[in-house]
Amino acid sequence: MNPAIPYLTFPGTCREAMTTYANVFDGVVTIMTTLGDSPVEVPDDAAGLIFNSEMRAGQFVIKASDDPNPGEGAATVSLFVSFEDADARATAFTSLADGGTVLFEIDGPFSMVEDRFGTRWMLVLD
């Protein structure tokens, strides 16, 4: 298993935030994919929102996206963990889902669960 990466979700300000963070930490934005360029079907007015982004400054990494349906309008934080072993990911997913809420099933390379403590986990198979 690789180290957990903070994953931020923004109410439409992801591009600006990640660009700012890259400048603040003397880093670089390595990924910036819009919803319009993703495999997800979205309305035209959401196509420019960010589907996936990544900022790296040395060992410091942040991943982020926009929420096309933001609730209160504040950024949220999830933990992004990538696994090389499918069984290890499945075990973590099942344990975190116990008493929590499954947000994306584990039927593909990406899954997401909110544990019983309210922490969101993005569990990805590399």
Image (cartoon, rainbow, N blue to C red):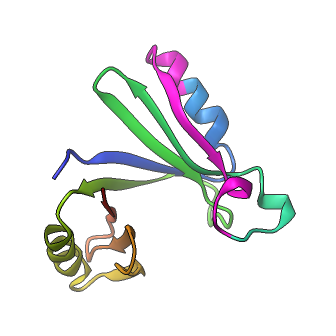
Locate residue 68: give its quadrant. Answer: bottom right
Q: Residue at x 54, y 17 (%)?
A: 23
User: Residue 46 at what x, y percent from top left?
Assistant: 78, 59
Horizontal relation, residue 39 to residue 93: left or right: right
Q: Position of residue 119 (x, y in %)?
A: 31, 64
Q: Residue at x 64, y 58 (%)?
A: 38
Up/down of 21 relative to 51, above or below: above
Name the foreground residue: 107 vs 60. 107
Q: From this viewpoint, which residue is outermost toward the top? A: 26
Looking at the rendering, which quadrant does residue 89 occupy?
A: bottom left
Q: Toward the viewer: 76 or 57?
A: 57
Highlighted range, magenta: 21-40
Q: Judge whether 66 appears above or below 56 on screen.
A: below
Q: Toward the viewer: 6 or 81? A: 81
* Apparent side of residue 96 relative to residue 119 in the rendered image (left or right): left
Number of callouts: 0
Asked whether 22 falls inside the magenta stretch, the response is yes
Let me know if residue 27 is in the magenta part: yes
